[in-house]
Amino acid sequence: MKVLDGKVAVIVGGTSGIGARTVELFVEEGATVVIAGRRSDAGEALAKKLGAAASFVKTDVARADDLKNLIDGAAARFGRIDCLFNNAGYGIPQRSIADLDIAEFDAQMAVIVRAVMLGMKFVAPVMLRQRSGCILNTGSIAAHRSGLSSQTYSLAKAAVVHATRCVAAELGESNIRVNSISPGAIVTGVFAKGVGVDPNTADRHLETVTKHFANAQPIPRAGMPEDIARAALYLASDAGSFVNGVDLVVDGGVITGNRFSAGIQARRDLVAAVKAEIDSAG
C-alpha cells in the first residue's frame, strides 16, 4: 500500500523545481494530483508524463479568481481535497532599502503572501466539511535569518511562516493540519531567475547552481527538490498526523550558523595574523 493512496492533492507552483518533484512523488505514492501554475507547456507535459493520476490547471496565483476556480474545480471534480501545497513563488535581486521598488514589492507580496492566504481561505470550507486535510506552505530559511535573500522575499516568507502558525491554531480544532516547509539552498531555477536570468531558460543553469551550493551548509552537498518533496510527503501522509503549526526547516544545517570548519580556519587565520604582527614588531 502506498502512503497517499486515495488522497487528492492540489500543488500550486507545480510545474518546475520543488513543485514538480513533489507532484511526481505524490503520484508515485498513490495520490491524484492537480498541478497548478502559469506555464501551460510545462504543466501539460508533466501531467501527460504522469498519466491519469495528474491533471493541469493554468493558474496565476496573483489572481484571486484563478485560485478560487482551481480549488472549487478540484473539489467538484474529485469530491474532496486532502492536501493543498501553496508553493508558488519567485526570487528578486537583493537591493538596498533605499532602492526598494514599490511595484516589485507589491507584486512579490501578492504572489508569496496574499496567494497563500487566499489558498488557505478557499480550501478551508472544503476541508472543514471533510473534517480533515493538510495544508502545506513553502517558507524559507530567509524567514529566519537576514542576508540570505532580498529584504522583500525574506519579509514575505516570514509572513508565510507566521500565517501558517496562526491558521494551524484555528483549523487544527477540525483535524486540519497546517504546516510550512522552509527550504535552504535548494537547486532550482528560482536562484537563476533571482539574478536576472530569463525564467524560460533558468533551468539550464542548474549545474552551476549545484556546484555553488555544495558548500553552503554543513552537509557537504547541495540540497535538491527531492529533499523538500520528501518533507512534503511526510507532512501530507498519515505519518505526520500529529504535526501541526510547525515550520519544518530542510536546509542541511544552514541556520545553525557558520560551518565548523570555516570557524576553525578563521581562528587559525587570526592566530597567524597576530603572530605575524608580533614578529614584524620584534
Image (cartoon, rainbow, N blue to C red):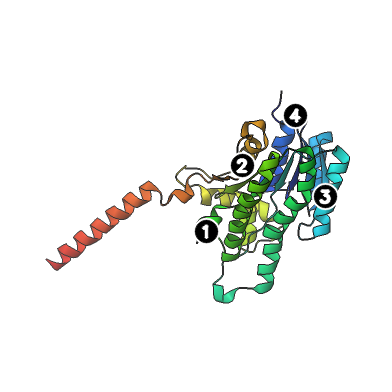
Q: Residue at x 67, y 33 (%)?
A: 237
**Pair 2/3: label in front:** 2
Inspect the image, locate mark 1, and give the three-letter code of the amino acid beneath it.
Answer: Leu
| Residue with the most extreme bottom position | 98
Tell me the quarter of the image containing the C terminus.
bottom left
- Dot 3 or dot 1: first in sequence order is 3
Cα separation, mark 2 vs mark 1, equals 26 Å
**Mark 4 nearby-residue class (10 Å; few <14, some 14–19, many ≥20):** some
Tag in front: 3 or 1: 3
The residue mark sitting in front, 4 or 1, is: 4
Q: Earlier in the sequence, mark 2 or mark 3?
A: 3
Task: Please name which of the two marks, 4 or 2, marks the residue nearer to the observer.
Answer: 2
Give x and y (percent) for residue 242. 61, 35
- Residue shown at the point (61%, 58%) measured from the top left: 159
Q: Which residue is mark 1?
A: 148
Using the image, tell me which numbered label, if any, was put on residue 5. Answer: 4
Question: At label 2, which amino acid type do we have?
Answer: Asn
Looking at the rendered structure, the kind of residue marked 3 is: Leu
Mark drawn on residue 70 = 3
Q: Are marks 4 and 1 in contact (CB under 8 Å)?
A: no
Q: Gap between marks 4 and 3, in whole Å?
A: 22 Å
